[in-house]
């Protein structure tokens, strides 16, 4: 079933725990958090020059398991189509790293982690975090792995925000950057959709002010949040193609049961999400996304002025959650700072999900771009 | 404050109760409901020929109070900008009627009405209703008012669906029709947004399977449903113009309080809605909207084949909830049946809300159209 020529086969999650004196990491908010653990995976091998490292950055509901299979799993990591032997991020050439963000719930320190001070899960004692904090933590991991300069940083959606933050926070630590389907700042419409998800969670009595670990989690609220998310990840066209107005095969007698396939799909995705994601992480991570604004206190002319990495910006025509004009703004900011930036708008009907689905087009673009970025280094 | 030259001043809601033998109205589902009360308002006077009647049809959260002021109210009816002396629907010329839909909660028979059989509010014993049922009930009111033929039927969004249903159910009872920002059938994306709202209500423990009258209503669930709605009624552009990333003046210490003005606005609109709307009505009416499909069992060539009314179709460029292509399909269906149809796509940034806000443009279009429709009659 799993083709060893293109699949990484079984992979394992590793953990790295660190802190800055006195055992914490300072956060953008002024608070501190620590010690911090990052769950991460690596695929391929670091070369002798330590020059072939690629950092993959995940989106809201992603994790460190980007590719290959966990022992016994039927499904591979979330970007397996893009990472492996011969793929866009070719593990025969590149050393690929992916870590779960802080605030997450897949092994990295987050609100469900036990607070060393209280010996109970943080819950709402977990401090607010930002995209900059996520990236700062990742830099500790990169140091730990002995990498001075990453060949590239790549990611879509919130992953793309981390790419942009890497460009600004650590311009000397990256050779190139690939922000996909993302934005320099979150728009009010994007904030509004996140806020609806948060309010759905907060409205669930099981949320209990964030203190529900060991009890029933706010599953209904989180499912509603995820349902809203899924609508925004697809497009009018892709929903029409996938579902149309087809009714479900199994109709129930309850008046407000799902009648249409699209309703059944949303319920299924919502209910499934609850099994694998923590509601408090959803709150903290969406807050970090909403706070993201690289133009806060600076102009579009200056935002990338320290930047000399080569940049590939990818957007998707039917993506209405992160519309192409937001990617064009990234390109504009690059050009104004004389950064070598290429823009590609992929003609997809998949909406925002396209960054996970348009594998062939992305592979073509990214392979070529990385070849050039690698050659630039060697020249 | 209220200008008597353009305002209707104080208006009153009236009620009409009716049934077909044996005291019920048959519904599209095969069930029956009755007796039925419709809350309605009228503005202006019916002329001697009974030829100047205009039926206004409201959207999801609307009601019969379309214009003028209720005694003591600070705000006028929901389409006051369009209805009154000298306005688009000029009450010096036209007799304007608006009734609350069945299933509603503003005086017409709905799930919060007392079921005559049990002497308790219907709750989920209320039968599922359709747009066709709403229109059938309106026809009883029109008969009661002694109107053989309406000069026009007009409405936006769900109101537009009722316009289209009038064209099909009672082609001989209308001279013209003005469907605004609407569709021949609800798309999977439109269904999906409604389903999220319903799931938010169903997830609220106070919903209690619809049996909450006299107890605490499912306010949090309904507020979340309304928040989702409001995002879809605006556009990316209008949200950016109205809110940008401005933060609220009053910041609270709770980590997940609204920080941004857009978040505060959504909460305000959600909380306010709960005071004036019934959650069960929200469920029933959105189900009716989602079931709407004029192309079910017929083709676009045949859907309007009985139709000889003059039609004005209005859409708005930034309306992504009811995109212009859906209005263009209505026009196409008209043309294929040789119906005299005019299409106008208004260049608005307001999104779906434009049908309530683009008063000047709509007034211009509708005044001219009604003048022609009236002349046709007289010729």
Image (cartoon, coloured by chain):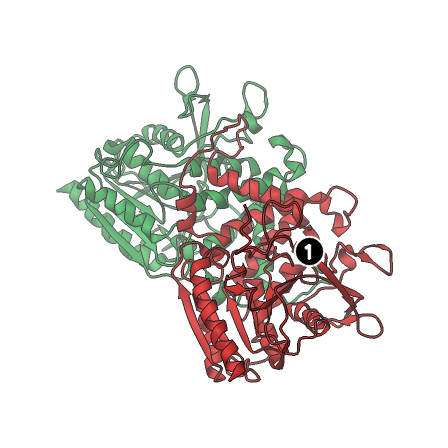
Chain colours: A red, B green
Q: Is residue B304 visible?
A: yes
Q: Position of residue B101 (x, y in %)?
A: 44, 35
The mark tally for this picture is: 1
| Image quadrant where residue B214 sits | top right
Q: Please, is residue B40 above or below residue B318 in the view?
A: above
Nearest the viewer among B265 and A45 is A45
In the image: residue A239, left or right of residue A69: left
Nearest the viewer among A152 and B15 is A152
Q: Please, is residue B95 above or below residue A354 in the view?
A: above
**Quadrant in which the C terminus of chain B appears:** top left
Label 1: element kind: loop
In the image: residue B204, left or right of residue B73: right
Nearest the viewer among A128 and B227 is A128
Q: Please, is residue A116 above or below residue A201 in the view?
A: below
| Image quadrant where residue A134 sits | bottom right
Q: Position of residue B51 (x, y in %)?
A: 24, 38
Q: Which residue is mark 1?
A: A12
């Amino acid at each position: 079933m799993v083709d060893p020529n293109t699949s990484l086969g079984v992979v394992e999650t590793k953990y790295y725990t660190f802190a800055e004196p006195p055992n914490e990491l300072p956060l953008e908010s002024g608070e501190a958090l620590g010690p911090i653990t990052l769950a991460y995976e690596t695929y391929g091998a670091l070369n002798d020059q330590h020059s072939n490292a690629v950092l993959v950055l995940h989106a809201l509901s992603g994790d460190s398991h980007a590719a290959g299979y966990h022992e016994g799993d039927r499904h591979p990591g979330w970007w397996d189509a893009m990472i492996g032997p011969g793929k866009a991020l070719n593990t025969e050439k590149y050393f690929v790293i992916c870590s779960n963000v802080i605030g997450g719930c897949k092994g990295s320190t987050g609100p469900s982690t036990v607070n060393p001070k209280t010996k109970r899960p943080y819950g709402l004692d977990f401090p607010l975090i930002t995209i900059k904090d996520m990236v700062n933590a990742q830099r500790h991991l990169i140091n730990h792995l002995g990498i001075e300069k990453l060949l590239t940083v790549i990611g879509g959606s919130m992953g793309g925000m981390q790419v942009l933050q890497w460009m600004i926070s650590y311009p000397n630590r990256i050779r190139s950057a690939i922000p996909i389907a993302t934005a320099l700042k979150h728009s009010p419409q994007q904030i509004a959709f996140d806020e609806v998800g948060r309010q759905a969670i907060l409205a669930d009595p099981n949320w209990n002010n964030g203190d529900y670990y060991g009890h029933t989690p706010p599953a209904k609220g989180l499912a509603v949040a995820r349902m809203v998310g899924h609508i925004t990840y697809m497009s009018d066209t892709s929903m029409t193609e996938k579902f149309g107005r087809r009714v479900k095969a199994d109709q129930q007698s309850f008046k407000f049961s799902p009648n249409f396939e699209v309703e059944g799909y949303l319920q299924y995705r919502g209910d499934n999400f609850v099994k694998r994601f923590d509601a408090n992480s959803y709150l903290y991570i969406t807050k970090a996304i909403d706070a993201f604004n690289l133009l806060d206190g600076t102009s579009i002319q200056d935002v990338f002025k320290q930047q000399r990495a080569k940049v590939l910006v990818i957007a998707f025509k039917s993506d209405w959650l992160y519309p192409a004009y937001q990617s064009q703004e990234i390109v504009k900011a690059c050009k104004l700072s004389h950064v070598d930036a290429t823009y590609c708008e992929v003609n997809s009907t998949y909406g925002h999900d396209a960054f996970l689905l348009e594998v062939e087009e992305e592979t073509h673009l990214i392979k070529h771009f990385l070849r050039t970025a690698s050659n630039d280094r060697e020249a």
